C-alpha cells in the first residue's frame, strides 16, 4: 500500500491502512475496514506502538496551558480527551484515570500518567490556593487552628450564627492571623474571600459532584452561568438542589439567591444607618432614628433587586418591617427632604405667566385708572393682582406625582434575628432552667397551700374568740360609760336600773 501524507491526527500505518488519533486512542477509518477487514485485524502493532510513543513524547512536553479540565471531569489535551477524574476519600485529591489504548505501554504510559497527575495537582493547587492555605497554616494556635479546620471542611463558607460563640472567643491576634489567610468576618457569613471567584467555585463544584455522584445536580450549569455573568442575585428555582447555590457562593433569601460578598456590602450600608444618632451630621442615606432604616436605591442597585425582592431578602436576613404611611410628615422619614421640600416644589412648578384676553383687559383698565383721577363717587376698581387667578399645576406629570405621593408607603426595618440551631440550644437550656424553677415553685406553692389550709381553721376559732371578747368589752364600756343625765336615754337607763332593784328586793 502506498504511503500518504499525514494531516493533523490522521496517520498511516504501513501495510495496514490509515486512521486517526483522538488523545491516546486510535480509530481506523471505516472505509478501509469494510474493504479489507482481515488485513485491518492483522495490522502492524509495531508501527502503531511507535506512533503512540511519539505522541506520548509530545504530550509530556506540552505546557499546562494546553490542558483543560471540563465540568464533567474530563481532562483534554489540545481539545482531545486523555484522562478522567475519579473521587477519592479526600475530596480535594481526586485520582486520574488514563484514557488510552493498550498500544501505549511501558515507560511511555507511565510518563503520560505522571504528566496528567502533575497537571491535576497544579490546577487544583492554583485555583484552590486560598482554601489550601487554611490547611497548611502552621502559625495558628489550637483554638484558631480548629476554627480554620472547620472552615476548611465547609469548603470556605460558614454561617456566622453557627460559630457565633467560637468567633466571640477569638482574640484580636487570632483574628489578625486569620485575616492574613484571607478570611473575612462578615455580618452574616464567615468566608474565604478568594474562594468566591468563578475559577475556585467551578473547581469546588466539580470536586463536590465527583464525590456526590448520586446527588441531585440539576441546575448546576445554570447557576454557574449566572455566576460567570456577574449576577449578584437571581430568582431561585425550587427544582434545583439548594446545596449548589451554597457551593457557588450564593445564599438563598426568600425567592432570591444573593452572593455572599454582596450581602456584606448591604450590611455595611445598613450598619451606617443603625449607628447614626438623630441630630448628627451628615445623615447616612436610609437612616431614620438610629434604630430602624428604610431601603434606598443604593441598596437595591448593589443587589440588582427591586423593592419587592429587597423585602424578601431583608426578611430572610432576620429584619422585620412596619409600614409608615406617607401622610406622616416626611421630615421624620428623610431629613434632607424636609430641608429642600420648598425649593424642589418651586423648581418643578415655574411661576405662572398672565396671558389671554382677560390680561389685556386688566392692562387697559390699569392704564385708564392711571390717567383718570379717582373720585369719591366712583368705586375703586380692584387691584390687578386680585384679578389674577391662582396658578394650578396641570398635566400627566403632576397627576403621576400626586398619585405616587398618595399611594406610596415607606417600610421601616429593624433587626430581629430568627431562631437558628444555636439560638434553639440556648433557648432549650433556658427552658430547662425555667422548668426546674417551676418545679421548685410548685413545690413551695403546694407546701404553702397545705399550711394555708390549716391556718383558716385556727383563724375561724380565733375570730369567734375575738368576737366574744369584743362584745364583752363593748358591754363593759357601755356600763362604765358616763351618760348625760338630761338625755332621754340616760333617764331610761336609770328607770331600768330602778325597776331591776325593786324586783330583786321583792324576791
Image (cartoon, grey):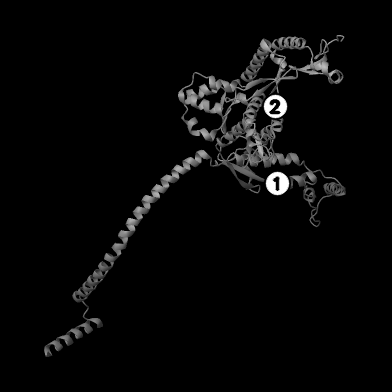
Taking the image as shown, residue 150 lies to the left or right of residue 86, namely: left
Question: Does dot 1 land on a helix, a strand or a loop?
Answer: helix
* Residue 113 versus residue 350 in the image, above or below: above
Quadrant (top left, top right, bottom left, bottom right) of the N terminus: top right
Task: Between residue 361 and residue 348, name the one nearer to us.
Answer: 348
**Label 1 – label 2 distance at C-alpha:** 55 Å
Taking the image as shown, residue 47 lies to the left or right of residue 497, namely: right
| Residue pointed to by mark 2 | 72
Q: Quadrant of the rendered structure where residue 297 is?
A: top right
Earlier-in-chain disc, 1 versus 2:
2
* Residue 175 versus residue 432 in the image, above or below: above
Question: Which residue is located at x 22 percent, y 70 percent?
Answer: 469
Question: Which residue is located at x 81 percent, y 16 percent?
Answer: 40
**Residue 426 visible in the picture:** yes
Quadrant (top left, top right, bottom left, bottom right) of the C terminus: bottom left
Question: Does dot 2 land on a helix, a strand or a loop?
Answer: loop
Residue 462 x, y percent position in the rendering = 25, 67
| Residue pointed to by mark 1 | 405
* Residue 246 versus residue 4 in the image, above or below: below
Q: Quadrant of the rendered structure where residue 319 is?
A: top right
Question: Which residue is located at x 72 percent, y 46 percent?
Answer: 404
Taking the image as shown, residue 348 lies to the left or right of residue 371, namely: left
For marks 1 and 2, give the one nearer the viewer.
Answer: 2
Q: Quadrant of the rendered structure where residue 318 is?
A: top right
**Residue 487 visible in the picture:** no
Q: Label 2 neighbourhood size at 10 Å, few (<14), some (14-19), many (20+)?
A: few
Amino acid at each position: 500500500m502506498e504511503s500518504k501524507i499525514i494531516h493533523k491526527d490522521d496517520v498511516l500505518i504501513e501495510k495496514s491502512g490509515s486512521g486517526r488519533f483522538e488523545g491516546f486512542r486510535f480509530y481506523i477509518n471505516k472505509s478501509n475496514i469494510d474493504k479489507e477487514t482481515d488485513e485491518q485485524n492483522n495490522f502492524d502493532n509495531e508501527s502503531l506502538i511507535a506512533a503512540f510513543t511519539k505522541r506520548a513524547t509530545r504530550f509530556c512536553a506540552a505546557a499546562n496551558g494546553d490542558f483543560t479540565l471540563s465540568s464533567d471531569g474530563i481532562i483534554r489535551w489540545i481539545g482531545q480527551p486523555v484522562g478522567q477524574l475519579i473521587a477519592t476519600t479526600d475530596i480535594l485529591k481526586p485520582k486520574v484515570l488514563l484514557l488510552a489504548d493498550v498500544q501505549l505501554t511501558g515507560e511511555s504510559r507511565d510518563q503520560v500518567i505522571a504528566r496528567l497527575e502533575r497537571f491535576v495537582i497544579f490546577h487544583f493547587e492554583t485555583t484552590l490556593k486560598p482554601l489550601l492555605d487554611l490547611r497548611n497554616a502552621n502559625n495558628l494556635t489550637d483554638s484558631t487552628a480548629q476554627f480554620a479546620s472547620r472552615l476548611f471542611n465547609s469548603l470556605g463558607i460558614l454561617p456566622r450564627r453557627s460559630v457565633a460563640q467560637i468567633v466571640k472567643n477569638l482574640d484580636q491576634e487570632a483574628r489578625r492571623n486569620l485575616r492574613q489567610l484571607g478570611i473575612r468576618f462578615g455580618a452574616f457569613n464567615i468566608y474565604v474571600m478568594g474562594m468566591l471567584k468563578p475559577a475556585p467555585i467551578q473547581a469546588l463544584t466539580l470536586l463536590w459532584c465527583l464525590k456526590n455522584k448520586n446527588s441531585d445536580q440539576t441546575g448546576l450549569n445554570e447557576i454557574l452561568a449566572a455566576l460567570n455573568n456577574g449576577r449578584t442575585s437571581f430568582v431561585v428555582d425550587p427544582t434545583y438542589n439548594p446545596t449548589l447555590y451554597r457551593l457557588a457562593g450564593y445564599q438563598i433569601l426568600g425567592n432570591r439567591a444573593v452572593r455572599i460578598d454582596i450581602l456584606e456590602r448591604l450590611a455595611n450600608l445598613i450598619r451606617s444607618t443603625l449607628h447614626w444618632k438623630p441630630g448628627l451630621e451628615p445623615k447616612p442615606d436610609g437612616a431614620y432614628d438610629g434604630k430602624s432604616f428604610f431601603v434606598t436605591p443604593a441598596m437595591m442597585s448593589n443587589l440588582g433587586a427591586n423593592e419587592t425582592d429587597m423585602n424578601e431578602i431583608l426578611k430572610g436576613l432576620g429584619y422585620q418591617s412596619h409600614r409608615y404611611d406617607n401622610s406622616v410628615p416626611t421630615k421624620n422619614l428623610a431629613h434632607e427632604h424636609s430641608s429642600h421640600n420648598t425649593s424642589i416644589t418651586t423648581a418643578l412648578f415655574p411661576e405662572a405667566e398672565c396671558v389671554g384676553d382677560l390680561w389685556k383687559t386688566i392692562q387697559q383698565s390699569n392704564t385708564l385708572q392711571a390717567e383718570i383721577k379717582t373720585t369719591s363717587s366712583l368705586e375703586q376698581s380692584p387691584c390687578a393682582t386680585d384679578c389674577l387667578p391662582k396658578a394650578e399645576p396641570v398635566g400627566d406629570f403632576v397627576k403621576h406625582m400626586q398619585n405616587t405621593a398618595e399611594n406610596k408607603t415607606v417600610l421601616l426595618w429593624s433587626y430581629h434575628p430568627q431562631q437558628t440551631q444555636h439560638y434553639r440550644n440556648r433557648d432549650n437550656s433556658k427552658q430547662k432552667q425555667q422548668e426546674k424553677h417551676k418545679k421548685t415553685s410548685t413545690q413551695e406553692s403546694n407546701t404553702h397551700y397545705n399550711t394555708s389550709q390549716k391556718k383558716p381553721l385556727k383563724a375561724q376559732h380565733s375570730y369567734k374568740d375575738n368576737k366574744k371578747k369584743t362584745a364583752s368589752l363593748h358591754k363593759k364600756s357601755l356600763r362604765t360609760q358616763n351618760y348625760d343625765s338630761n338625755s332621754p336615754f340616760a333617764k331610761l337607763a336609770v328607770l331600768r336600773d330602778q325597776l331591776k332593784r325593786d324586783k330583786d328586793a321583792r324576791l
